[in-house]
Image: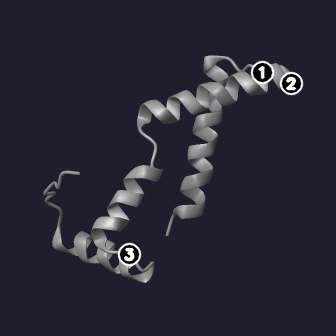
Amino acid sequence: MSDANVRIPEEAKDRLAAIAAAEGLSLRAYLARLAETLLTPAERAERAEKALATLQKWNGYAPSAAEQGDLDSELDRRLAAVTAP
């Protein structure tokens, strides 16, 4: 296993270290676990594609690109509404 140096703001490092400590982990172990659990954009796209194929097979759900865009916009709007200060 190789080590890597990553430059981030001190505040971000301190926050991550505090989160790691609260979970009983070193910052290194926490970041390694985080990297293992997050999906890359390609992995997220692949999962979305599989989910859509499963829905289509299960119940015929097959939105057009325009419908998907509308649904994405609606989801974005709702998320913004609940996360706004």
Q: Is residue 33 left or right of residue 85?
A: left
Residue placed most toward the observer, 11 or 57: 57
Displayed quadrant of residue 15 = bottom left
Q: Which mark is residue 59?
A: 2
Residue ID at (67%, 24%): 67
User: Eyeballing the image, is 29 above or below 81?
Assistant: below
Secondary structure beneath dot 1 equals helix
Whole-number angstrom distance, CA of label 3 to CA of label 1: 42 Å
Secondary structure beneath dot 3 equals loop
User: Eyeballing the image, is 22 above or below 67?
Assistant: below
Amino acid on which the number 1 mark rests in the picture: Gln
First reached walking from the N terminus: tag 2 or tag 3: 3
Report which residue position mark 3 lands on.
25
Q: Is residue 46 left or right of residue 30?
A: right
Characterize the local packing of mark 1: few (<14), some (14-19) or many (20 or more) Cα atoms within 10 angstroms.
few
Residue ID at (58%, 32%): 47
Q: Using the rendered image of the protein, determine whether residue 69 is visible from the camera's viewpoint.
A: no
Characterize the local packing of mark 2: few (<14), some (14-19) or many (20 or more) Cα atoms within 10 angstroms.
few
- How far across and down, in percent of the image, does residue 75 sit? 62, 44
